[in-house]
């Protein structure tokens, strides 16, 4: 599998070099060179997977350098990577927009985090929502969002059992129809939560 890479240039005060190296190596970065451009400032050049910098890399860099680092990058093409494709299925339907690449050593952790993040960001629906995360051709994580409970019998006073039965059957048929058409409302935050899963 190949993934897109970028060449990143970071200028940082010398006292924060260790923290920046730790951050970059934690994001699968490979140092190309390090130059002291003055006594207090260091220029670091790294090749980094694009997937590792698109979410919160810049925020983390600012955090570990107290805002004193600058970061610039350019795309350098694709490189062979030891990664696996992580795919998300909602009620059995694959969502291509939520597919991401994760290092093989981290794939189980990332898959579980993706499933959990989606469980916490997708609101309850009228039908049960089953989240399955697949990696290496098999399902490695699963979460379920229980359906909203609508009391269809609330306006049904008295003891008319056949009417109650009819209302419950009608609700059951409606839920079956919704499951069939896979109408699950997925908010924008859910997509962002998937991108952040491999950095949590």
Image (tube, helix red, strand yellow):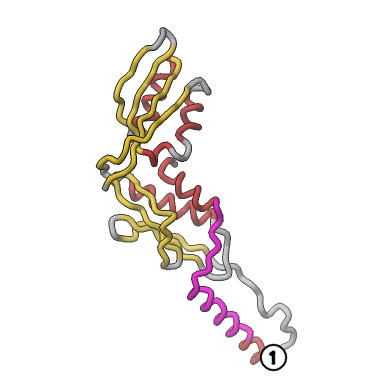
For residue 149, what is the image quadrant?
A: bottom right
The quadrant of the image that shows the C terminus is top left
Secondary element under disc 1, as helix, strand or loop, is loop
Q: Is residue 93 above or below residue 9?
A: below
Vertical side of 6 occupied by 101: above or below: below
Give x and y (percent) for residue 147. Answer: 56, 68
User: Residue 101, percent across and down?
Assistant: 35, 48
**Residue 142 shows in the view:** no
Q: Which residue is drawn at 44% across and 46% down?
A: 197
The boundaries of the magenta stretch are 167-188
Which residue is nearer to you in this view: 17 or 73?
73
Frontmost residue, 97 versus 92: 97
Going 53% across and 59% down the picture, which residue do you hit? 186
Image coordinates of residue 165 in percent, x first then y, are: 61, 87
Residue 169 is one of the magenta-drawn residues: yes
- Seen from the viewer's position, the closer of residues 143 and 101 is 101
Q: Can residue 176 be seen at all in this image of the molecule?
A: yes
Determine which residue is flagged by label 1. 160
Q: Nearer the viewer, residue 20 or 96?
A: 96
Q: How crowded is mark 1: few (under 14 residues within 10 Å), some or many (20 or more)?
A: few
């Amino acid at each position: 599998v190949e993934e897109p890479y970028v060449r990143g240039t970071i200028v940082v005060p010398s006292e924060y070099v260790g923290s920046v190296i730790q951050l970059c190596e934690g994001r699968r970065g490979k140092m190309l060179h390090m130059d002291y451009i003055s006594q207090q400032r260091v220029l670091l050049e790294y090749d980094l997977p694009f997937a590792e910098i698109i979410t919160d890399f810049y925020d983390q860099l600012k955090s570990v350098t107290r805002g004193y680092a600058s970061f610039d990058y350019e795309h350098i093409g694709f490189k062979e990577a030891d990664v696996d494709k992580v795919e998300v299925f909602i009620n059995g339907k694959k969502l291509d927009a939520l597919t991401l690449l994760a290092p093989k050593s981290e794939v189980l952790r990332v898959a579980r985090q993706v499933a959990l993040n989606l469980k916490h960001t997708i609101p309850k629906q009228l039908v049960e929502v089953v989240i399955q995360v697949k990696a290496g051709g098999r399902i490695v994580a699963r979460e379920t969002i229980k359906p909203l409970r609508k009391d269809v019998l609330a306006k049904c006073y008295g003891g008319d059992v056949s009417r109650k039965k009819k209302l419950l059957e009608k609700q059951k048929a409606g839920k079956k129809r919704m499951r069939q058409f896979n109408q699950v409302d997925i908010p924008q935050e859910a997509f962002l939560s998937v991108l952040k899963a491999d950095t949590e």
